[in-house]
């Protein structure tokens, strides 16, 4: 069913309003990743290192996806605005 | 023991080791940095989950039938990919936090089991060899009498103090502290073995009289010393040395651990701050000072060795009675909200007051206090701060109570220069000022939440228009 005129624009504007602060938070988290303490040593620390890397990788990946979604939403809105 | 406020050379936040934290109500111990790392992972996971849900709850465009362009529909697909990626990242962060908690608990249990094994060996050896020590009992008694005579002489006390000051490395280490802890835990078995009792019999005998764990050994020490005229107990009297009321200002409340420690008095042993706000019941902060003399012989000073050992034993002590008299004099009733702060013996007194049930204690902060065997009431907020190379807290045995958040670090880390100008450098006020600075700078939620609670007990009132603060100092003396 077709949406009323202006409804698609409202949906896209709402998405941008929600995505922008999320992108900011993820950029901050990627720029300053959760760093494991350097005074922790031993087997448990070594085993945990791999998991720590995975956290960083996943957060960076989420940041890229959010940026891509935000850019695509902006383009879609620009298309409607003409 | 005290050397006045200020950080002395060799005892700065930098020369100490990392902070170790055991959050309130928990058994696990880890560094403050590791706790803070775990906190940040938790915050990250929560934030990712929350943001992922916000994306999920956004309105959908549906299909091309909605009139949406191909580009708009494509952005919707990317939005769903972003939501999935965020949910996955939240899951990995949450798993990392969980794995970290498991590692912390595993480490703590390994430490605990090693400690329990060492204690078991110590107690077995004590019980096994103590009967043979009976052969040496006459000699030991003679040595005890001789030592008592020597310690009654102030000149000899100074000589002993000088020698100990020149060799701080002997007793300023976590290993020595652990040895002290083991010794006090085995004291009742040693005494029982020498008396010819089977292992555990003396502990059972003392427990039947209400003295459990290290209390038993401390009771035996007090009762034994009293046979030689030492560690005597007396009545006590107090006097008000100063009292003043001022309108509350932002500087009226002690904010943070270091500022509270700075207000712990010396000379006049008790300082009480009364916070009044319009229409609210008064709140009180009671600061209790450290030991003033280590003389085992009777003087006019109630904050002495007798109150120290008697306090650990859970016996009646002059410093405890004097503080209660000052609290009553200040107008504190059983229902008045009270925050207690103490250093060394002052911390011991503060903890016993909180545990007594006679006062409405809502917060407690102790610095270098032998309080590990005191069972505190549930719900009490605060911090128990210790230097792990300070043997004084170990005189109460292992840390059995976990009501407060426990914070510990070495005052002098491996390789740091240990000062020789004062005895017991890791127990000096300067060393605890340095540790307090490190605690204030802690990054973990476990520590910062407690600091904020203790601060707000005062700032809730001082931030109000028309609030006042009354500061009163008390001096106590023994009455022979």
Image (cartoon, rainbow, N blue to C red):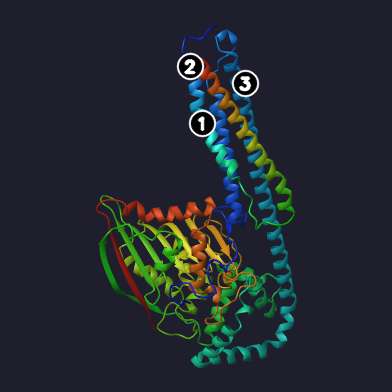
Residue under the point 58% across and 64% down: B409
Q: Identify whether B295 is placed above or below B394.
A: below
- Do pointers 2 and 3 mark residues of a single chain? no
For label 2, the residue is A81
Label 2: element kind: helix
Residue B77 badge: 3
Towards the viewer: B363 or B75: B75
Q: Is residue B379 visible?
A: no
The quadrant holding residue B83 is top right
The residues bearing labels 2 and 3 have C-alpha atoms spaced at a distance of 21 Å
Give the chain of mark 2: A
The residues bearing labels 1 and 3 have C-alpha atoms spaced at a distance of 17 Å
For label 1, the residue is A20
Looking at the rendered image, the quarter that the C terminus of chain B falls into is bottom left
- Residue A34 is situated, as x and y percent measured from the top left of the image, at 61, 46
Residue under the point 24% across and 53% down: B466
Residue B342 badge: none
- Residue B320 is situated, as x and y percent measured from the top left of the image, at 43, 70
């Amino acid at each position: 069913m077709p949406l009323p005129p202006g409804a698609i624009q409202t949906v896209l504007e709402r998405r941008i309003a929600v995505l922008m602060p999320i992108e900011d938070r993820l950029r901050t988290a990627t720029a300053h990743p959760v760093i494991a303490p350097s005074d922790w040593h031993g087997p448990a620390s070594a085993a945990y290192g791999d998991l720590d890397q995975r956290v960083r990788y996943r957060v960076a990946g989420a940041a890229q996806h959010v940026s891509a979604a935000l850019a695509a939403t902006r383009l879609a809105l620009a298309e409607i605005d003409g | 023991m005290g050397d006045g406020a200020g950080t002395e050379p060799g005892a700065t936040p930098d020369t100490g080791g990392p902070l170790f934290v055991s959050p309130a109500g928990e058994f696990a111990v880890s560094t403050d940095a590791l706790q803070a790392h775990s906190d940040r992972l938790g915050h990250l996971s929560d934030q990712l989950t929350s943001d992922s849900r916000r994306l999920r709850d956004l309105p959908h465009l549906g299909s091309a039938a909605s009139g949406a362009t191909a580009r708009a529909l494509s952005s919707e697909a990317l939005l769903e990919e972003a939501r999935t990626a965020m949910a996955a990242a939240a899951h990995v962060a949450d798993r990392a936090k969980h794995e970290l908690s498991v590692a912390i608990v595993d480490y703590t249990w390994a430490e605990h089991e090693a400690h329990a094994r060492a204690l078991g060996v110590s107690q077995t050896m004590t019980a096994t060899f103590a009967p043979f020590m009976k052969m040496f009992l006459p000699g030991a008694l003679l040595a005890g009498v001789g030592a008592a005579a020597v310690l009654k002489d102030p000149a000899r006390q100074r000589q002993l103090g000088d020698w100990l000051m020149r060799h701080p490395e002997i007793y300023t280490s976590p290993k020595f502290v652990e040895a002290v802890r083991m010794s006090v835990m085995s004291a009742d078995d040693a005494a029982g073995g020498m008396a010819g009792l089977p292992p555990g019999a003396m502990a059972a005998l003392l427990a039947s009289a209400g003295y459990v764990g290290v209390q038993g050994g401390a009771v035996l020490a007090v009762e034994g010393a009293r046979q030689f005229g030492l560690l005597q107990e007396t009545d006590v009297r107090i006097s008000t040395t100063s009292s003043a009321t001022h309108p509350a200002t932002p500087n009226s409340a002690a904010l943070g651990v270091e500022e509270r420690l700075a207000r712990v008095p010396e000379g006049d042993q008790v300082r009480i701050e009364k916070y009044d706000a319009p229409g609210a019941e008064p709140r009180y902060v009671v600061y209790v000072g450290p030991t003033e003399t280590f003389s085992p012989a009777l003087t006019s000073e109630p904050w002495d060795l007798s109150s120290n050992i008697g306090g650990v034993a859970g016996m009646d002590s002059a410093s405890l009675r004097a503080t209660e008299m000052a609290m009553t004099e200040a107008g504190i009733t059983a229902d008045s909200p009270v925050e207690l702060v103490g250093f060394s013996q002052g911390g011991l007194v503060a903890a016993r007051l909180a545990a007594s049930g006679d006062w409405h204690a809502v917060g407690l902060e102790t610095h270098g206090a032998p309080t590990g065997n005191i069972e505190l009431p549930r719900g009490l907020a605060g911090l128990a701060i210790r230097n792990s190379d300070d043997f004084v807290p170990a005189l109460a045995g292992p840390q059995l109570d976990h009501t407060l958040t426990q914070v510990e670090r070495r005052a002098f880390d491996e390789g740091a220069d240990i000062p020789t100008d004062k005895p017991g450098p890791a127990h000096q006020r300067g060393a605890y000022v340095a540790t307090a600075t490190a605690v204030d700078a802690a990054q973990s939620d476990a520590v910062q939440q407690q600091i904020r609670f203790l601060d707000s007990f005062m700032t809730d009132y001082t931030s109000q228009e028309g609030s006042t603060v009354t500061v009163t100092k008390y001096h106590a003396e023994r009455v022979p």
